[in-house]
Amino acid sequence: MLQVYDSNVISIGSSSVPLAVRALDWQGAAAAACRRSELQDIEKLRRDLAGRALELTDEAVDFHSIYVDRDARSATTVVGGTVFRLYRGDLFLVRPCVHCGSRRFESAAVRDLVNLRYALSVWEPRCEACAPEDEV
């Protein structure tokens, strides 16, 4: 039976518990559940990126070398000098402008070895200011 003796104590059966303690219990449980969810999201992003990179490159990726931005739903790592970024489920290569190197660009989504080969050998990202003269 639930009884409230005053505004600060609640009694359930034969136990009396201060409301502040009960509030901390459920708030602590909610915070712990949120933290577990965050850690699971981070682990999933790392696992997905490591698996996709292994599938395309045959190189294992150390989970600790993967940077995760949980809010952006992205994970980034370097494999053999190439930057791979998983963003909202799609995998991209990140490369600097081939002329000045100052800006970074994401390739089209890399879904298979054909896309990877194109991004590594044909794709030449350039800043607007660095576009070849025949394209201007």
Image: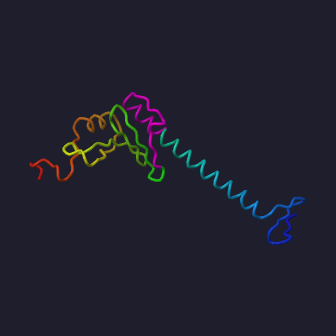
The magenta stretch is 47-69
Q: In this view, does 46 lie to the left or right of 135?
A: right
Looking at the image, which residue sits at the far bottom?
6
At which x and y percent is residue 67?
44, 43
Q: Quadrant of residue 86?
A: top left
Foreground residue, 65 or 116? Answer: 65
Q: Which residue is found at the position 25% from the left and 48% from the top?
A: 102
Q: In this view, does 25 lie to the left or right of 38?
A: right
Foreground residue, 24 or 109? Answer: 24
Looking at the image, which residue sits at the far right?
14
Residue 57 is inside the magenta segment: yes
Q: Which residue is found at the position 37% from the left and 40% from the top?
A: 84
Q: Is the N terminus in the top left, top right, bottom left or bottom right quadrant?
A: bottom right
Question: How many numbered badges does the structure rendering display?
Answer: 0
Q: Which residue is found at the position 40% from the left and 47% from the top?
A: 87
Q: Is residue 21 left or right of residue 66?
A: right
**Colouring convention used in this rendered image of the protein:** rainbow
Q: In this view, does 67 lie to the left or right of 82?
A: right
Q: Which residue is found at the position 37% from the left and 32% from the top?
A: 56
At which x and y percent is residue 21?
76, 60
At which x and y percent is residue 88?
43, 49
Looking at the image, which residue sits at the far top?
58
At which x and y percent is residue 133?
9, 49
Could you tell me what secondary structure mostly forms the magenta stretch?
helix
Residue 86 is inside the magenta segment: no
